[in-house]
Image (spheres, grey):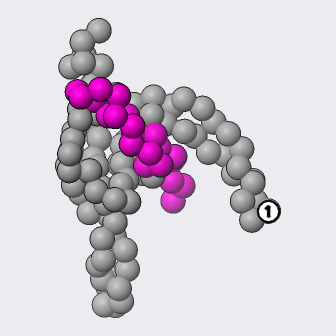
């Protein structure tokens, strides 16, 4: 299967930036960096125990065309969900794999 056939989902890459809420207080907001084509795969689900609370976490791998402008604190928005990028792996000079964890809101 060719790369263009595999990259069949539309995602938005985001980063966290300083902003203000309605009262003028400083807050972090998600700012869009780019909208790109990607391959999205949920690879595993695991149970995390954090501060005596159990929560289910899904690890997702997202493959995109290689980019040099990926910022720090990268987030991905896909189908109304946010994913925190834990690692960016360069598979080859054509693609990059984003290893993500779904952020519960």
Question: Which element carries disc 1, helix, strand or loop?
Answer: loop
x%, y% of residue 29?
33, 70
Residue 45: quadrant of the picture = top right
Residue 9: quadrant of the picture = top left
| Frontmost residue, 66 versus 30 | 66
Quarter the N terminus occupies: top left
Q: Which residue is drawn at 34% across and 34% down?
A: 90
Local crowd at mark 1 within 10 Å, few (<14), some, or many (≥20)?
few
x%, y% of residue 76?
36, 48
Q: Mark 1 points at which residue?
A: 52
- Left or right: residue 57 compared with residue 33: right
- Left or right: residue 54 compared with residue 97: right
Q: Characterize the magenta stretch by its predominant secondary structure.
A: strand
Q: Which residue is drawn at 51% across and 31% down?
A: 42
x%, y% of residue 36?
22, 39
Q: How many marks?
A: 1
Q: Can residue 55 be seen in this view?
A: yes
Q: Can residue 38 be seen in this view?
A: no
Residue 78 is a magenta residue:
no
Farthest residue in the top direction?
A: 1
Q: Which residue is drawn at 30% across and 71% down?
A: 17
Q: Which residue is drawn at 45% across and 34% down?
A: 61
The stretch of residues the image draws in magenta is 85-105
- Left or right: residue 73 compared with residue 53: left
Farthest residue in the right direction?
A: 52
Residue 97 is a magenta residue:
yes
Q: Is residue 51 above or below residue 57?
A: below
């Amino acid at each position: 299967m060719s790369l263009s056939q595999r990259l069949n989902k539309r995602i938005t890459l985001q980063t966290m930036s300083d902003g203000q809420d309605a009262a003028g207080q400083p807050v972090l907001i998600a700012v869009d960096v780019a909208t790109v084509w990607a391959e999205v795969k949920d690879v595993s689900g695991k149970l995390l125990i954090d501060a005596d609370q159990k929560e289910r976490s899904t690890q997702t791998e997202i493959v995109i065309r290689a980019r040099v402008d990926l910022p720090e604190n990268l987030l991905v928005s896909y189908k109304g969900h946010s994913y925190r990028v834990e690692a960016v792996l360069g598979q080859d000079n054509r693609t990059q794999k984003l290893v993500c964890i779904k952020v519960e809101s």
